[in-house]
Image (tube, rainbow, N blue to C red):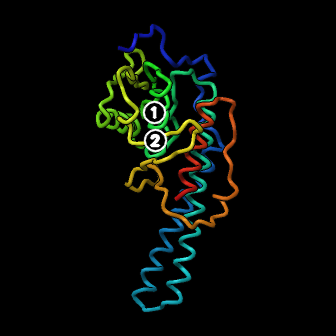
């Protein structure tokens, strides 16, 4: 079982636990992604009209624009996810992972692979900083119930930290890597990673759709390194997984 900790994880005077989801750079990337999704929605309505009118040329033109806008929007969300995960975890303890600022599918991706890696390295537990939903729409937490559901599905014993309701503790003793619906090799490359199928957008999160193989972002974008090996491997895995789609 996971030992109780006498001190709370978060200390208002401790800058180590600063939440980078409040950073202007992060907010800017998310806002740009949302604006692109809104633009895509409007073009989609125009596309439907073009089909109804039988204007094939216009429909094809709009379809190509939609693809490019979707690529741009998802690139912005990837950058935001990589940024906030990197910044929030660069100073985390070895038994912690901070999911603040991530959309649900992003959070589950990072968490599944971190758990698999922790099991592989015989770590006894993992403290998952899920937050209290204070920054979610209407103050309703999204990541905490998603993580709770994932643990139930994977038969992982877990509980809320009695000292901090924004932290979920997962007991990894007597667990096996094949309990987690993802695979992580020793080089940090995502071998087979099951992305959630539900489309996330806006306050809920993005869905990474299939994209052309010659996508310029995929060819050129490289993750920044933090110096924290586990964080760097997880970010690298996210990029490799999405680039392979």
The residue pinned by badge 1 equals 116
Q: Identify which residue, 42 or 70, lies in the foreground.
A: 70
Residue 190 in the figure: left or right of residue 155? right
Q: Identify which residue, 5 or 243, lies in the foreground.
A: 243
**Quarter that holds the N terminus:** top left
Asked if residue 38 can be seen in this view, the reply is: yes
Residue drawn 37% across and 29% down?
176
Residue drawn 65% across and 29% down?
228
Residue drawn 67% across and 63% down?
216
Query: Given the current orientation, which residue lies at the most extreme top position?
Result: 6
Q: Quick one: label 1 or label 2, which is nearer the N terminus?
A: 1
The reply to whether discs 1 and 2 touch (Cβ–Cβ < 8 Å) is: yes
Looking at the rendered structure, the secondary structure element under dot 2 is strand
Residue 26 in the figure: left or right of residue 150? right
The residue pinned by badge 2 equals 183
The disc placed on residue 95 is none
Label 1: few (<14), some (14–19) or many (≥20) C-alpha neighbours in 10 Å: many
Label 2: few (<14), some (14–19) or many (≥20) C-alpha neighbours in 10 Å: some
Asked if residue 21 can be seen in this view, the reply is: no
Query: Residue 61's image quarter?
Result: bottom right
Using the image, determine if residue 108 lies above or below residue 5: below
Distance CA(mark 1)–CA(mark 2): 7 Å
Query: Residue 168's image quarter?
Result: top left
Looking at the rendered structure, the secondary structure element under dot 1 is helix
Using the image, determine if residue 244 lies above or below residue 111: below
Residue 240 percent location from the top left of the image: 58, 50
Residue 241 percent location from the top left of the image: 53, 50
Using the image, determine if residue 70 lies above or below residue 127: below
Query: Given the current orientation, which residue lies at the most extreme front position?
Result: 186
């Amino acid at each position: 079982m996971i030992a109780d900790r006498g001190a709370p994880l978060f200390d208002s005077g401790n800058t180590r636990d600063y939440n980078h989801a409040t950073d202007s750079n992060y907010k800017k990337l998310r806002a740009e992604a949302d604006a692109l999704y809104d633009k895509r929605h409007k073009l989609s309505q125009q596309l439907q009209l073009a089909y109804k009118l039988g204007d094939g040329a216009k429909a094809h033109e709009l379809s190509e624009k939609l693809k490019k806008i979707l690529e741009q929007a998802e690139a912005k969300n990837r950058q935001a996810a990589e940024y906030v995960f990197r910044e929030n975890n660069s100073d985390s303890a070895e038994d912690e992972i901070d999911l603040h600022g991530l959309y649900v599918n992003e959070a589950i991706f990072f968490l599944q692979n971190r758990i698999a890696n922790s099991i592989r390295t015989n770590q006894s537990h993992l403290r998952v900083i899920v937050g209290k939903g204070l920054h979610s729409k209407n103050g309703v937490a999204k990541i905490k119930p998603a993580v709770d559901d994932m643990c139930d599905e994977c038969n992982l014993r877990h509980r809320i930290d009695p000292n901090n309701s924004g932290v979920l503790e997962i007991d990894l003793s007597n667990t096996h890597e094949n309990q987690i619906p993802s695979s992580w090799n020793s080089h940090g490359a995502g071998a087979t990673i099951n992305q959630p199928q539900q489309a996330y957008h806006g306050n809920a999160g993005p869905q990474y759709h299939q994209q052309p193989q010659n996508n310029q972002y995929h060819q050129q974008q490289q993750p920044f390194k933090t110096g924290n090996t586990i964080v760097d491997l997880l970010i690298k895995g996210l990029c490799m997984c999405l680039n392979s789609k």
